[in-house]
Image (cartoon, rainbow, N blue to C red):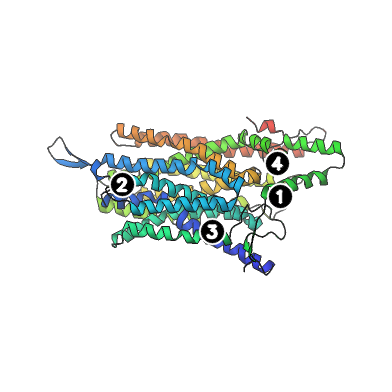
């Protein structure tokens, strides 16, 4: 079995874990974000068609008004996207407390249940899509959550792999395009989703043989093994590893009990990227930090912009194309195809964040400080991308939407990869699941604003122009986050250059609320 032949088997296992994780994220994890392609299929199959009504216009012409049907489909996506993020908080606690295997088994159960519900749905059972899409969304984000730690196996390429997985997550939305094309070729929706259900056997095998029972620590210790190896299952407690590393750090850098007490106080008062002594105090200090607050705002405003765009894409294309189904189908396919490029866009963000790896640190600079300094450019570029995407989406010009699609997938791949990478470098590893879950859950609450935005668009006669302008202005808040990190790193650099007797220790109070 893999892992029984020493270092060679371990390297093979690492590469297989990386490759299969990439395949899992690419083909399964983020399929719900291809919702626009699936809506096109569902409309043709008559789902929620009872909500369409015939209305007579002023000139006496009778037309079919399906705005209520569009609202129902938008509501399904709103609920699913909210559940996708909000439940990441309890799921993050499950991941940190019970480990990878338990979390993945939960993911497999939810994903299988969701795909089976879609397979059992019909025109008469359209309501099944409410729980089904939510289950698929939550199961998919759990696949991503458990795969992010794979980056820990590859040291200097850690951020690159994290962003690569998030890019694959974005690209998986093209799966619904494939289902749309297959439906046009005569393959039923039921057959496609039954196939996805059967594929969950692959997830189960990967959970047993290519993923740890607990967590993958960072940095990876020597002789670290995971999965079912040589007839037994290996496990590793990342929390114990973090605690051991912290104790070793204190022992190596202090010689007396007084020195050790001073060093621990220093850790407790330092920036949130440094691990304090108490687990509860550590987690609380991370949450009550300016880093976390601005990162939450950075993610929330951009995510709201993306969710509203995806949820309203089909009615927007219908409006701009004057209800021409062929044109709508053409643009829907173009949007879905561009989603495939997310896997190629995301690693560029990782390369931006890893560009300092392998280079000598500045005198007195820590590795975590260098990671933070390197993240500033990534955070700024992501904010700028979202601003440009929002501007293009606001302009009611149909051909311009091709550029909008490109900017949207580029920004999404940078956004979610950068989110996971920043949390992994700015905060302690043992709290990653909880912090990742908390920021996603709180951003989910903000994403609920898309529903009143949809109601406002309806009040304005279906024209989202003024709502889009408001959201474009809102995205300017995202630029605060990279600015705050830049100023923090510059302040640390200035303190290093000051004489030792006058340099002030960077306190946690500067980062805390």
Q: Are marks 1 and 3 in contact (CB under 8 Å)?
A: no
Which image quarter: residue 75?
Answer: top left
Q: Using the numbered discs, state the Cα–Cα distance from disc 4 to disc 3 in whole angstroms.
A: 29 Å
Looking at the image, tell me whether mark 2 or mark 4 is earlier in sequence order: 2
Q: Quick check: 82 left or right of 41?
A: right
Residue to which mark 2 is pinned: 126
Q: Using the numbered discs, state the Cα–Cα distance from disc 3 to disc 2 in whole angstroms.
A: 33 Å
Looking at the image, tell me whether mark 1 or mark 4 is earlier in sequence order: 1
Classed neighbour count for the residue bearing mark 3: other residues with Cα under 10 Å, few (<14), some (14–19), many (≥20)? many
Say the numbered circle drawn on residue 21: 3
Q: Nearer the viewer, residue 166 or 214?
A: 214
Q: Using the numbered discs, state the Cα–Cα distance from disc 1 to disc 4 in whole angstroms.
A: 13 Å
Give me the residue at 33% from left, 57% from top: 190
Classed neighbour count for the residue bearing mark 2: other residues with Cα under 10 Å, few (<14), some (14–19), many (≥20)? some
Looking at the image, tell me whether mark 1 or mark 3 is earlier in sequence order: 3
Give me the residue at 50% from left, 49% from top: 141
Residue to which mark 1 is pinned: 241
Looking at the image, tell me whether mark 3 or mark 2 is earlier in sequence order: 3
The answer to whether residue 341 is seen in the rendering is: no
Residue to which mark 4 is pinned: 275
């Amino acid at each position: 079995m893999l892992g029984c032949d020493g270092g060679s088997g371990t390297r093979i296992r690492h590469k297989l874990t990386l490759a299969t994780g990439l395949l899992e994220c690419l083909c399964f994890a983020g399929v719900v974000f291809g919702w626009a392609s699936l809506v096109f299929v569902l409309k043709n199959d008559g789902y929620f068609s009872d909500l369409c009504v015939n209305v007579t216009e002023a000139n006496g012409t009778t037309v079919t008004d399906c705005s209520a049907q569009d609202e129902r489909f938008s509501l399904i996506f709103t609920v699913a996207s909210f559940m996708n993020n909000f439940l990441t908080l309890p799921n993050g606690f499950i991941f940190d407390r019970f480990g990878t295997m338990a979390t993945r088994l939960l993911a497999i159960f939810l994903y299988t249940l969701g795909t089976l519900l879609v397979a059992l749905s019909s025109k008469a059972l359209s309501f099944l899509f409410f729980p089904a899409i939510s289950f698929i969304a939550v199961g998919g984000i759990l696949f991503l959550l458990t795969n992010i730690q794979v980056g820990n196996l590859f040291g200097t390429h850690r951020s690159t792999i994290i962003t690569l997985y998030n890019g694959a997550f974005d690209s998986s939305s093209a799966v619904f395009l494939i289902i749309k094309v297959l439906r046009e070729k005569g393959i039923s929706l039921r057959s496609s989703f039954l196939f996805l259900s059967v594929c969950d056997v692959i997830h189960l095998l990967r959970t047993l043989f290519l993923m740890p029972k607990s967590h993958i620590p960072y940095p990876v210790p020597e002789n670290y093994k995971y999965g079912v190896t040589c007839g037994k299952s290996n496990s590793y407690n990342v929390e114990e590893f973090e605690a051991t590393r912290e104790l070793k750090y204190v022992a190596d850098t202090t010689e007396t009990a007084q020195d050790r007490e001073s060093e621990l106080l220093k850790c407790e008062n330092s920036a949130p990227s440094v691990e304090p002594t108490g687990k509860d105090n550590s987690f609380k200090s991370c949450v009550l930090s300016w880093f976390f607050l601005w990162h939450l705002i950075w993610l929330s405003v951009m995510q709201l912009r993306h969710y509203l765009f995806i949820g309203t894409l089909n009615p927007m294309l219908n409006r701009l194309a004057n209800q021409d189904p062929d044109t709508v189908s053409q643009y829907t396919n173009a949007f879905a195809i561009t989603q495939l490029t997310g896997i190629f866009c995301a690693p560029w963000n990782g390369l931006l964040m890893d560009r300092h790896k392998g280079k000598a640190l500045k005198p007195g600079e820590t590795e975590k400080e260098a990671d933070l300094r390197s993240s500033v450019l990534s955070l700024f570029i992501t904010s700028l991308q979202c601003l440009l995407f929002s501007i293009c989406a606001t302009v009611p010009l149909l051909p311009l939407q091709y550029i909008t699609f490109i900017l949207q997938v580029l920004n999404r791949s940078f956004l979610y990869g950068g989110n996971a990478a920043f949390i992994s470098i700015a905060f302690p590893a043992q709290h990653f699941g909880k912090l990742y879950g908390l920021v996603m859950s709180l951003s989910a609450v903000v994403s609920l604003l898309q529903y009143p935005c949809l109601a406002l668009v309806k009040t304005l006669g279906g024209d989202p122009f003024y709502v889009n302008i408001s959201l474009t202005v809102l995205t300017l808040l995202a630029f605060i986050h990279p600015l705050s990190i830049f100023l923090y790193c510059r302040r640390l650099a200035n303190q290093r250059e000051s004489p030792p007797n006058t340099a002030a220790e960077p306190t946690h109070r500067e980062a805390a609320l």
